[in-house]
Image (spheres, coloured by chain):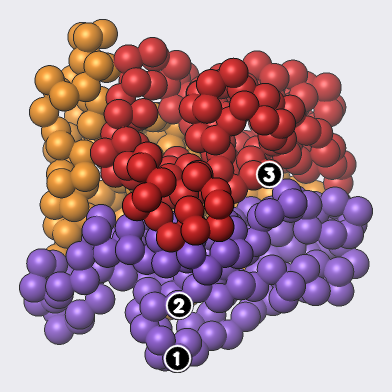
Chain colours: A orange, B purple, C red
Amino acid sequence: MKSVTEHLSFCTKQRREFVNITERIQTLVVRSGIREGLCLVNSMHITSSVFINDEEPGLKRDFQQWLDRLVPEDPSLYYHSRTGEDNGAAHLRRTIMGREVVIGVTGGQLDLGPWEQIFYGEFDGQRPKRVLVKIIGA
Amino acid sequence: MKSVTEHLSFCTKQRREFVNITERIQTLVVRSGIREGLCLVNSMHITSSVFINDEEPGLKRDFQQWLDRLVPEDPSLYYHSRTGEDNGAAHLRRTIMGREVVIGVTGGQLDLGPWEQIFYGEFDGQRPKRVLVKIIGA
Amino acid sequence: MKSVTEHLSFCTKQRREFVNITERIQTLVVRSGIREGLCLVNSMHITSSVFINDEEPGLKRDFQQWLDRLVPEDPSLYYHSRTGEDNGAAHLRRTIMGREVVIGVTGGQLDLGPWEQIFYGEFDGQRPKRVLVKIIGA
């Protein structure tokens, strides 16, 4: 069994941002030389997310608008704010969007469907964050 | 390390449908000959889901009713509709229900709890869709 | 390839409870002797969850308050109650919080970010439940 451990680094300009990381993950898979296996991609932070959906600007706005409705930004709504933090909403939003994805590796490539794109979802950015990429297989 | 890659195909009669795929996945695991490992089951589409919950008709109605409340169907609510698509709600619903499950393989069987059942959750059906099943182990 | 299968048992005092299991999972990883691989941690029940977030009491109250709003407790709201069960809300809450996490194993340790803590999330407790821990790697 072979394994490869890599990290991606982010420091988004906006507090909230969706960054398409499909090509970066695909490059790491090809470079790993692993032909058959699994690829774990997870945020190492608890106010950001890794998820798979569509590369379509309108849909990205829909996600943000929907998260605003399900998890209002206003820090006064959250007990978490008593710690001095103002990112309670970010913790809940990332829960809906998901911490991680696990993707098949087949024939040395990411085994994605035709419209599947991998995103890093930042909900409390403008500071350094990391994503773990762990590929295991043979 | 051994690995097996399989696909399930769906073309649901209804636009929204939950299909129990537990037996089909179990059959693939047994046929793989893998005794100990992990089994990834993921939708290859971004408007459908793979999730684990209960095989109970009332609960399946509860899921649909709840998704209607959290993510209204009306296409006029979504920026995504400007592309000509009418499935904005399906993209968000699948996000709540989840893209994938990872299940342990123990003693050559799916290592599921007593009531765990695996479902394909379709939110924009009546056309061909696929699920990836990737089993790795020894 | 090596693999280890372990179970954690729970019988929470409260119906709803978040239990930090990070140290227990870390101990199992170290004991496994696996240096590089993946660690699956999943609830074996469909009314409880395994998720990663922050060990902060205020945030844990925020999660509960938010789940109350998104998924009201009242059993009369759910078709599932017609079976005699009163835990319809628990099935939906666990869906939002997630069934499982997959964590990298690197250098013989859980490869977690600085604030990542693993929780068992119980939504219908006061009875025996189990979590599966499956570690594979080399």
Labels 1 and 3 in the same subunit: no
Q: Amino acid at mark 1?
A: Lys
Labels 3 and 2 in the same subunit: no
* In the image: residue C34, left or right of residue B24: right
Q: Amino acid at mark 2?
A: Glu
C120 shown above or below C72: above
Q: Residues within 10 Å of mark 3 (few under 14, many from 20)?
A: many
Q: Which residue is mark 1?
A: B13
In depth, the one of C11 and C27 nearer the eye is: C11
Secondary-structure class at tag 1 = loop
How many angstroms separate mark 2 from mark 1 (CA)? 8 Å
Q: Residues within 10 Å of mark 1 (few under 14, many from 20)?
A: few
* Residue C41 visible in image: yes
In depth, the one of A133 and C133 nearer the eye is: C133
**Residue at 53% over, 80% down:** B130
Callouts 2 and 1 close, C-beta under 8 Å:
yes
Secondary-structure class at tag 3 = loop
Disc on res. B92: none
Question: At which x and y percent is residue B27?
Answer: 80, 74
**Residue at 82% over, 38% down:** C5
Q: Which residue is mark 2?
A: B17
Quadrant where the C terminus of chain A is found in the figure: bottom right
Callouts 3 and 2 close, C-beta under 8 Å:
no
Secondary-structure class at tag 2 = strand
Disc on res. C44: 3
